[in-house]
Image (cartoon, rainbow, N blue to C red):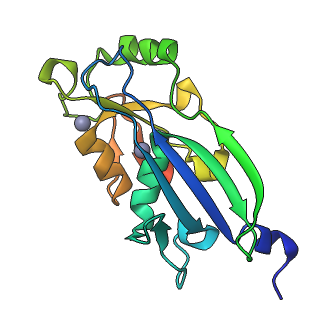
């Protein structure tokens, strides 16, 4: 039998608001878009047999893509009961504030933090704040734990690759990777 807690977390409905790229990063002027995704907790964590995530229009979405969206979005999170009633709502301002982006910009010189990657301001590529401690686990954003990467590197992180940063740290979709001794 399922516990009450498990049932409560049967499904999350996530309203993702893709936030305008900050003027500080200034390489893109895209209107924000909203996307409505319903995903079970099981699917969010890639448990076998989980039903796929669906958008408001009914299209299925790979869970890796949902996690990628989660990384760079302001999220309104609704927890649904099995009867699809909303039983909990929280809003998280995930993306870095402008002054935090400015700090990261100074740290990175406006270049992707991926080792060997030189995309960034000089090449006209936008940088994306990636959060190694995924929202799904930590529910928080901290400027110290934000990594600025280009779209290509960001995609790689969320699709199974382990990336080395210029400072030598390793990370993948599950967070920081400690190298074997
Ligand atoms: Zn990310
Ligand atoms: Zn890159």
Horizontal and vertical percent position of residue 168? 36, 34
Residue drawn at the location 20% of the way across and 29% of the way down: 125
Quarter of the image where one finds residue 110: top left
* Most foreground residue, 166 or 95: 95
**In the image, 139: left or right of 29?**
right
In the rendered image of this protein, does residue 30 appear above or below residue 38? above
**In the image, 17: left or right of 125?**
right
* Most foreground residue, 159 or 32: 32
Q: Could you tell me which quadrant the N terminus lies in?
A: bottom right
**In the image, 4: left or right of 164?**
right
Residue reaching furthest to the bottom: 1
Residue 173 in view here: no
Residue drawn at the location 43% of the way across and 12% of the way down: 102
Horizontal and vertical percent position of residue 90? 71, 45
Horizontal and vertical percent position of residue 28? 26, 26
* Most foreground residue, 161 or 93: 93
Residue drawn at the location 60% of the way across and 73% of the way down: 42
Residue reaching furthest to the front: 57
């Amino acid at each position: 039998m399922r516990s009450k807690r498990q049932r409560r977390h049967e499904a999350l409905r996530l309203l993702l608001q893709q936030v305008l790229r900050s003027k500080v990063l200034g390489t893109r002027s895209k209107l924000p878009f909203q996307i409505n995704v319903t995903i079970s907790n099981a699917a969010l964590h890639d448990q076998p047999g989980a039903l796929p995530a669906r958008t408001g229009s009914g299209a299925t979405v790979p869970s890796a893509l949902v996690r990628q969206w989660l990384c760079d979005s302001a999220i309104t999170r609704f927890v649904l009961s099995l009867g699809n009633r909303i039983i909990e709502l929280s809003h998280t301002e995930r993306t870095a504030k402008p002054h935090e982006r400015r700090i990261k910009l100074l740290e990175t010189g406006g270049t992707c933090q991926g080792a060997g990657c030189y995309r960034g301001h000089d090449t006209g590529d936008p940088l994306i704040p990636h959060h190694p401690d995924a929202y799904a686990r930590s529910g928080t954003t901290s400027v110290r734990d934000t990594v600025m990467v280009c779209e290509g590197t960001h995609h790689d992180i969320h699709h199974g690759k382990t990336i080395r940063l210029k400072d030598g740290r390793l990370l993948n979709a599950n967070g920081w990777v400690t190298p074997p001794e």
